[in-house]
Amino acid sequence: MLEIARTFLRMASLLFSLLVMYLVTAQPALALEEALISYAGPSITFLPAEVARQRGFFREQNLDVKLLLTRTEVDRAALASGNIDYTLRAGSTFVSAARGLPVRIVFLSTTKPFWGLVVRQEIKSVSELKGKSMGVPGLLGSQQISAKFILKQNGLDPDRDIIYRIVDTGTRIGAILSGSIDSAMMDYGEAYRAKKLGLKLLINAAEYHGLLAGGLGVNSAKLRDHPDQVRRVIKALLQALRFMRENPDGTQQVMMSWLKLDREMAAEIYQMAINNYTRNGMVEESMLNSLVTTMLAEAGIKGVAPSQLTDFTLLQQALK
């Protein structure tokens, strides 16, 4: 009888151990938090976010990030209302914040523009664009502000001498070839494809000026009520910036799949672009003040301090 009791206890102990193991291993994985991040379309400007997505940096931060294609005007309203959580458009977010909308910049990924002015082969100079049309992804977005700067530097009145047309990323090449527009601002990837189809990259905007085009804009309520999630988004983007500098081959693989580039184009664009990104999501205060003041002036906004438009508290915490 004693031996039977011992056997029963051993079996009960074994069953209990198996039950505990089952309960531990059967627990569902922690559900990823969904975060909507808007952008203007696949572009070298927004590459850090795609690197973070493809390389799993968002997932490591327990985030399921959805990149949502929007137009600039829609993006502003959606971010301000909280219908989207974040935007990668730094330029338009600066303008929105300066106009009093409840949004803030919490991370900066670029210091120079990643695009150029593409025209038909017969156009030899910027001055020849007087009276002609130019495609941009949105009014008062970073690319239009950049275009205005280039036009002004070449003696044109950017508000009177050019007709701006809103043309989505990916359709501007066809629009120029069909004659619907005469020129367009295009990111490096689209510009290189345009060159292969016989168009001309007339101006590389990065040689003309600095610009805070890419970053992370956040709805103020999101920033106030969910700082931990915002911090984790920032951490993933910081990982992406570090990966991009330390792993050129891996970065170019992301570029090839996302921007539909061949290996030669990806390598060439990488070399052109890599030093246009920030190293840690921040820029020096003097550069920040200069670039933001210039950007706002182009949008007709004066007397707003850049420090009123940013909140780098969570970024500084992430860097520590």
Image (cartoon, grey):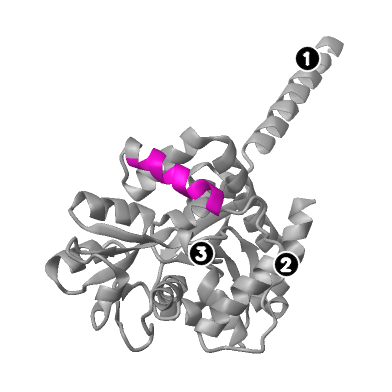
Contact (Cβ within 8 Å) of mark 3 with mark 2: no
Place of residue 4 in the rendered image (x, y in percent of width and height, measured from the top left): 79, 13
Disc 1 to disc 2, C-alpha distance: 75 Å
The residue closer to the viewer here, 65 or 295, is 295
Contact (Cβ within 8 Å) of mark 1 with mark 2: no
Residue at image mark 3: 37
Residue at image mark 1: 7
Ranked by sequence position, the earlier of labels 1 and 2 is 1
Numbered badge on residue 203? none
Residue at image mark 2: 285
Ranked by sequence position, the earlier of labels 1 and 3 is 1
> For the view shown, which residue lies furthest in the top direction?
3
The mark closer to the camera, 1 or 2, is: 2
The amino acid type, in three-letter code, at marker 1 is Thr
Contact (Cβ within 8 Å) of mark 1 with mark 3: no
The residue closer to the viewer here, 246 or 157, is 157
Range drawn in magenta: 265-276
Place of residue 104 in the rendered image (x, y in percent of width and height, measured from the top left): 64, 75
Residue visible at 30% across and 82% down in the picture: 162
Let me know if residue 269 is in the magenta part: yes
Let me know if residue 61 is in the magenta part: no
101 on left or right of 199: right
